[in-house]
């Protein structure tokens, strides 16, 4: 059986060869384009030709020669005509050979040549031009076009196909200088009825072969046929074979290019991700290219210690890493110094720019790139303080990806805010692309060419070396990262965002308020997971293990680890910095009735602006524990009007007389350590004659508030005891 298959395979191949040879004789074809530079767009063009199996037919004109066609952002480009003229001279009398000419930087082939040729032949034309909806560059020529009933009316010279002899003769019809406009040249010839007839010139009005995207974005749809993406023209019900991102449609072309020509498939995911990648091996640190990590702390940022921690733990040999740290926030000096003092000398070099250097962000970015070149880096890794690299292999994987500019996908937790834009609105700002949600949710994984990337990306030094390609962060009135993206788009430099794996996330700095004491502890809801990692007790999750029996030091009094020592320390600091403890009398202006029956020396959460955060804490971390031990009671969210920290000390208020709480249940979190910070203290439940005295910081007692759990605060005999109390569901 196996040999039969092999044999069959051979026959197929032989047939294929014969067929191709026959066809070659029949209709020999050459594909021309003009490209002075190997831009990313041009690499994409070549890749698509390769995918369609005709890479070998491509003749690139103008390689390595300076571009002479003027500023292509407006008119120009007749240089292409003159190049083609020279190239076609040898075929000037060839009436059989087919020539396909397209632009190079903004074109993708969507079909094999054989298919393009057969479709061309169906037109019965000697030369077929692509068509578009704009009469460019001279609008007033529109009236001279032959009337049509359907399709795009006007000639576009970004793609045409025809017989060599006819094309040559058209090219020779009148002289042009390099900086003239090529489209105007072909338009004039087409609009001349005699020429049009003589060369049997037609336009591909309905995009049967050529799809120009500018002005036609609403007429095309990306579709999938099983695994393969294709472009459907829904206006004319055609499936174009060559797509051209003319005019202002480059961003759309780039987005389509993420899928078309076998770039991505639903089943296999990213197919072009492997192009040109390398592999770096742990045991060969000397082979890792040297990288400058440029860190920008340009705004108050929560969880900065963790940020540096994750930089430090990147699995990349430190002997190959240089650091440039820009910190414009004096408040963060401590964290930066802590990091550089502890770890700085493990890196090849460290350069720090602080607020006292009075350097603006765009200027700092220029300095960092200079520093990279000075240190002979191979890659420039720019990262802002909000970008957390949870995956320690991020930098290594980005290097292995080998792209000009490539960054990891980073998304804010529980939000749709990420470090890239999928599309650009007409005003130049954010627009959501059709695939944006699928990318940020990792439903589509791959390497995405995007119009805007920020916060974290690796740039190959080849782009830094060349003045024409070196990133620009300074455009008047524009944010540095906007300037960066705008210039890259203009220069046809692709920016890739990578979500082949999970790399990390973005911190949300919006609610961060440096005027607070220990401001990170306020970030409980805006940066929940980071907060949780920093402040929740290591054993918190064990509370929920099925075989875990909750600790019950007294009847119906439950005891749980909930927050860690750092939380406790920072919370006491917040209270002591605020300092306005109540006087322990029955008069309490903070209460609605102004009267407190069982007063303590305390500070309410709302006095330190922590009320909202505290209620969130009750909902997210306390309520689940309550539901675990007091079964059948559900109150979501828990309500609580009395949330406060109590301070007991012998010379102030050492104890609290027996009382009930006005709560369904009460929580009591110890914030410091008995036997170390104070002696005595604890809580006694009178009905059971049961006391909890060996309280542990970060552990929470939970008990019913009324009737059964009449309780008192035991006397502190030395030092200061702090506890955090809430009366839940009063
Ligand atoms: C190609 O690169 C050269 C420098 O290497 C630059 O001068 C030229 O403007 C670039 N041409 C295009 C079309 O981008
Ligand atoms: C545009 O075409 C019209 C009609 O041929 C001509 O009169 C006019 O000079 C052209 N405009 C430019 C700017 O070339
Ligand atoms: C930069 O590009 C060069 C040439 O393609 C490559 O050898 C080098 O590894 C790249 N550097 C990085 C850091 O990716
Ligand atoms: C309460 O318990 C303490 C010690 O556990 C004991 O000394 C005392 O006698 C008990 N009181 C009553 C009334 O049972």
Image (spheres, grey):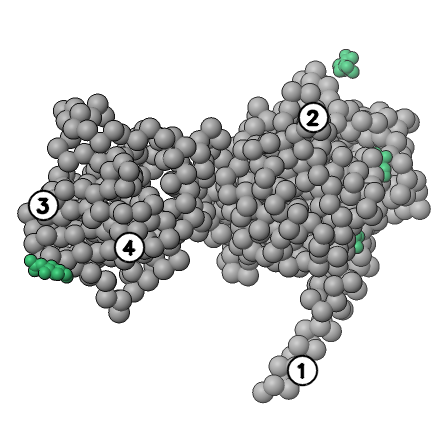
> 427 and 232: which one is in front?
427
In the image, what residue occupies the spot 38% across and 30% down? 578
Q: Describe the element under mark 2 as helix, strand or loop.
A: loop
Between marks 4 and 3, how big is the CA–CA gap? 22 Å
Which of marks 4 and 1 precedes in the sequence? 1
From the image, which quarter does the N terminus lie in?
bottom right
Decide: few, some or many residues near mark 2? Use Cα within 10 Å; few <14, some 14-19, many ≥20. Answer: few
- Cβ(mark 3) to ligand 4 < 8 Å? no
Between marks 1 and 4, how big is the CA–CA gap? 81 Å
> 112 and 566: which one is in front?
566
Q: Are marks 2 and 3 in contact (CB under 8 Å)?
A: no
Quadrant of the rendered structure where residue 470 is?
top right
Q: Which residue has dot 2 on it?
A: 358
Q: Position of residue 301 (x, y in %)?
A: 53, 37
From the image, which quarter does the C terminus lie in?
top left
Q: Which residue has dot 4 on it?
A: 695
Between marks 2 and 4, how big is the CA–CA gap? 50 Å
Q: Which residue has dot 1 on it?
A: 7
Q: Describe the element under mark 4 as helix, strand or loop.
A: loop
Q: Position of residue 7 (x, y in %)?
A: 67, 82
- In this image, 703 relative to 435: left or right? left
């Amino acid at each position: 059986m196996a040999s039969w298959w092999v044999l069959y395979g051979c026959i197929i191949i032989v047939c294929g060869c014969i067929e191709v040879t026959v066809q070659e004789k029949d209709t020999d074809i050459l594909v021309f384009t003009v490209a002075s530079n190997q831009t990313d767009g041009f690499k994409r063009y070549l890749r698509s030709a390769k995918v369609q199996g005709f890479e070998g037919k491509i003749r690139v004109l103008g390689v390595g020669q300076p571009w002479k066609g003027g500023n292509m952002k407006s008119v120009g480009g007749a240089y292409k005509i003159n190049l083609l003229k020279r190239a076609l001279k040898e075929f000037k009398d060839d009436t059989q050979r087919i020539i396909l000419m397209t632009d190079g930087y903004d074109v993708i082939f969507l079909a094999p040549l054989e298919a393009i040729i057969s479709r061309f032949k169906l037109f019965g034309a000697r030369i077929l031009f692509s068509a578009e909806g704009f009469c460019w560059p001279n609008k007033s020529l529109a009236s001279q076009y032959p009337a049509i009933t359907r399709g795009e009316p006007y000639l576009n010279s970004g793609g045409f196909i025809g017989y060599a002899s006819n094309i040559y003769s058209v090219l020779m019809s009148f002289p042009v200088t390099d900086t003239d406009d090529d489209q105007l040249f072909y338009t004039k010839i087409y609009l001349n009825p005699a020429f049009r007839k003589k060369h049997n010139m037609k336009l591909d009005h309905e995009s049967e072969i050529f799809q120009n995207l500018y002005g036609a974005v609403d007429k095309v749809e990306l579709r999938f046929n099983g695994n393969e993406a294709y472009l459907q023209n829904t206006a004319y019900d055609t499936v174009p074979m060559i797509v051209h991102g003319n005019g202002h449609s480059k961003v759309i072309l780039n987005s389509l290019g993420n899928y078309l020509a076998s770039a991505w498939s639903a089943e296999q995911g990213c197919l072009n991700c492997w192009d040109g990648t390398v592999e770096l091996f742990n045991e060969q640190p000397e082979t890792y290219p040297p990288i400058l990590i440029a860190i920008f702390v340009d705004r108050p940022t929560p969880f900065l210690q963790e940020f540096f921690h994750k930089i430090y733990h990147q699995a990349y040999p430190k002997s190959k890493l240089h650091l440039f740290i820009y910190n414009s926030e004096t408040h963060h000096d401590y964290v930066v110094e802590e990091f550089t003092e502890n770890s700085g000398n493990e890196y090849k070099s460290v350069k720090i720019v602080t607020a006292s250097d009075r350097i603006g962000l765009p200027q700092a970015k220029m300095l960092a790139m200079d520093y990279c070149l000075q240190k002979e880096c191979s890659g420039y890794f720019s990262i802002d303080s909000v970008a957390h690299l949870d995956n320690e292999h991020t930098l290594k994987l980005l290097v292995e990806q080998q792209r000009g500019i490539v960054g990891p996908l980073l998304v804010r937790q529980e939000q749709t805010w990420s470090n890239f834009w999928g599309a650009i609105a007409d005003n130049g700002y954010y627009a959501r692309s059709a695939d944006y949600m699928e990318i940020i949710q990792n439903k589509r994984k791959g390497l995405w060419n995007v119009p805007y990337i920020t916060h974290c990306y690796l740039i190959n030094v080849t782009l830094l070396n060349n003045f024409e390609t070196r990133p620009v962060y300074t455009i008047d009135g524009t944010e540095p990262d906007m300037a960066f993206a705008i210039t890259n788009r203009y220069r046809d430099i692709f920016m890739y965002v990578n979500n082949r794996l999970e790399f990390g996330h973005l911190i949300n700095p919006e609610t961060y308020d440096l005027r607070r004491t220990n401001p990170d502890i306020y970030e409980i809801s805006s940066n929940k997971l980071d907060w949780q990692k920093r402040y929740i007790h290591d054993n918190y999750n064990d509370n929920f293990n099925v075989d875990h029996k909750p600790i019950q030091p007294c009847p119906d009094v439950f005891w749980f680890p909930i927050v860690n020592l750092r939380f406790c320390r920072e919370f006491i600091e917040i209270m002591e910095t605020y300092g306005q403890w109540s006087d322990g009398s029955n008069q309490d202006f903070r209460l609605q009735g102004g009267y407190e029956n069982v007063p303590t020396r305390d500070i309410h959460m709302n006095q330190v602006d922590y009320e909202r955060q505290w209620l969130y804490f009750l909902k997210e971390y306390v309520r689940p524990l309550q539901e675990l031990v007091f079964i059948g009671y559900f109150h979501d969210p828990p309500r609580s009007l009395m949330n406060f920290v109590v301070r007991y000390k012998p010379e102030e208020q050492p104890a609290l007389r027996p009382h009930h709480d006005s709560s369904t249940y009460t929580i009591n979190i110890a914030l410091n350590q008995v036997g170390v910070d104070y002696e005595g203290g604890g809580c006694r439940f009178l009905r059971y004659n049961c006391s909890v005295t060996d309280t542990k910081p970060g552990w929470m007692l939970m008990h019913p508030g009324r009737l059964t759990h009449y309780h008192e605060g035991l006397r502190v005999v030395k030092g200061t005891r702090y506890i955090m109390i809430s009366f839940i569901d009063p």
